[in-house]
Amino acid sequence: MEGVLTVPIADNIISPVGFTTEENVAAVEELRSGLRSCSGRCGLPFDFTASLLDRERFADACAEENIGDDYTFFEKMLILSVTRAMRGTGVDPASPRTLFVISTTKGNVSLLENPGEFPESRLPLSRAAWEVACRRFGCPNPPLVVSNACISGLCACLAAHRSLQSGRYSHVIVAGADEQSPFIVSGFQSFMAVSPEECRPFDKDRRGLNPGEAAAALVFEARDSAEAVSGQWAAVRGAVRNDANHISAPSRTGDGCRQALKYALGDFPPQKLAFLSLHGTATDYNDSMEGEAVAGAGLLDIPVVGFKGYYGHTMGAAGVLETILSMKAVDRGTVPATRGFSTLGVRVPLSVSSSSRKTDRTAFIKALSGFGGCNAAMLFQKM
């Protein structure tokens, strides 16, 4: 619909460093990470470092919100984050004008190893999403599930944007989450991609990624652009581009990521971007590919930020969580530090933010890349 803005009005982050957005923003500002050594964890025969939720604190938070054990751990993650994001918004989740978009890569993966009292029918992503959106929150609309590898969370934000632009909905609630399991960690390790130490995005001494657990929720609202308020955020445009390079390895030339970045930028002046919030997994191929993509998009002068040094790779939550953190950083007039980065370790001269710095710019691009050659980028701007 012409003249409609996609406006984020509320958010929440549940992670090992905090169960509110404010706690997570403070952790990033203080360079505090949830990454810990996980020797002997998950029954795996190798050492790795990960960012995992404190199960006791999580159980207490669920009890506070009356989230019962008739929901799985993964479903509870989504419910807790959505509940806290929606508080005080006045948004009716049971309205026919409200849509839920759920982002995840593995959903109820832990049920494969330990189903407990849950039936096999709980495994499909669509069923888990229904449990959250329809059973818990009473939404009459079937939830949209986005499961597109690492770019799922940003794809979900893009789906929310397009849904609001269509005029069918007044509000879209985006929620992303994933829990870690032996299946996931050993899968990454099969590619020799898991680091035994804290990850170092874009750094010459990087050794791989760290698995992470988190849930994040964003509430979007459709507003008339004629009523735009100064300082109000808006999702401007975004794109998904698949270069179909390989089942797991990214393109060496960064073609898909470059195209997504250029589309998201459009005619927006690059000099008004505070930073590029990149995927930055700290794996050799991904970091190098993103560098090539940024260079190809003509954005080498723009500061680059990565959040994996705080949270690890949170998979389905990453695009939502990192978008929220990017907005909060711009609100505070800062370009966040890329924790773990010291010396540039990619071919092109990326301007990686090694320490927090000030900025008066009021827009950023969030970008992610993933398995299967999928890439996504989205421009967010303060009015």
Image (cartoon, grey):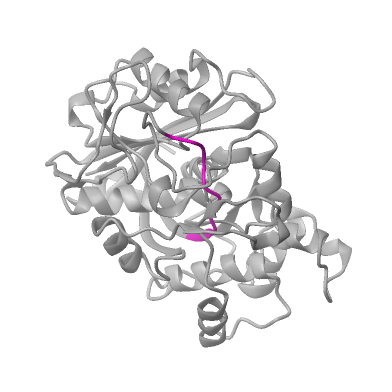
List x then y, in percent, for residue 56. Answer: 55, 80
Magenta residue check for 354: no
List x then y, in percent, for residue 204. Answer: 37, 28
**How many tags in the picture?**
0
> Is 331 left, or right, of 224 in this rendering?
left
The residue shown at (53%, 67%) is: 53
List x then y, in percent, for residue 374. Answer: 59, 28
Quarter occupied by the C terminus: top left
**Residue 347 occupies quadrant:** top left
Q: Is residue 94 visible?
A: no
Q: Is residue 337 visible?
A: yes
Task: Name the main secondary structure of what is drawn in magenta.
Answer: loop
> Is 185 left, or right, of 222 in this rendering?
right
Residue located farthest toward the right when viewing the structure as drawn: 120
List x then y, in percent, for residue 375. Answer: 53, 28
The residue shown at (49%, 40%) is: 158
Quarter occupied by the N terminus: top left
Give 52 or 224, whichever is nearer the viewer. Answer: 52
The image shows residue 341, relative to residue 285, as above or below, that is below
Give 55 or 122, whichever is nearer the viewer. Answer: 55
Give the magenta-colored segment's residue range.
206-216
The residue shown at (53%, 55%) is: 50
The residue shown at (40%, 40%) is: 200
The image shows residue 349, relative to residue 15, as above or below, that is above
> Is 169 left, or right, of 345 in this rendering?
right
Magenta residue check for 208: yes
The image shows residue 208, relative to residue 177, as above or below, that is above
